[in-house]
Image (cartoon, rainbow, N blue to C red):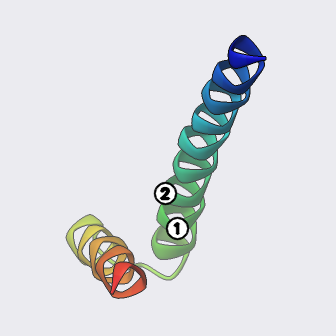
Amino acid sequence: MFIFWILIFILSLALLVKSADWFVESSEKIGLALKISHFIIGVTIVLLALLFLS
């Protein structure tokens, strides 16, 4: 049973990493389509991440 939970944890972690990658790529594409600099896109992503954590 313990191995099952470890497998679930690893799969969940992989899904979290992939969804974060997808979010960043999509945000970058939207920002570039609106002609916003890479710096502003990055700062906005970090700002949203910190906002959601609190």
Compared to 28, does 9 lie above or below? above
The residue singled out by tag 1 in the image is 27
Find out whether the residues at labels 2 and 1 contact each other: C-beta distance under 8 Å: yes
Using the numbered discs, state the Cα–Cα distance from disc 2 to disc 1 in whole angstroms. 5 Å
Q: From the viewer's perspective, is 18 left or right of 8?
A: left
| Residue at figure coordinates x 53%, y 46% from the top left | 21
Identify the residue shown where x is 55% and y is 62%. 29
- The quadrant in which residue 42 appears is bottom left
Q: Secondary structure at mark 2?
A: helix
Tag shown at residue 8: none
Residue carrying label 2? 24
| Residue 44 image point, x, y percent | 32, 80
The disc labelled 1 sits on which kind of residue?
Answer: Ser
- In the picture, measured across the screen, residue 45 lies left or right of residue 3, that is left
Q: Secondary structure at mark 1?
A: helix
- Residue 26: give x, y in percent of width and height: 60, 61
User: Which amino acid, mark 2?
Assistant: Val
The local crowd at label 1, few if under 14, some if 14 to 19, many if 20 or more residues have their Cα within 10 Å, is some
> Which residue occupies 61% across, 25% down?
10
| Horizontal side, residue 53 vs residue 24: left or right | left
Label 2: few (<14), some or many (≥20) within 10 Å? Answer: some
On the image, the x and y values in percent for residue 12 come to 67, 38
Q: In the rendered view, does 24 fall on the left or right side of 18?
A: left
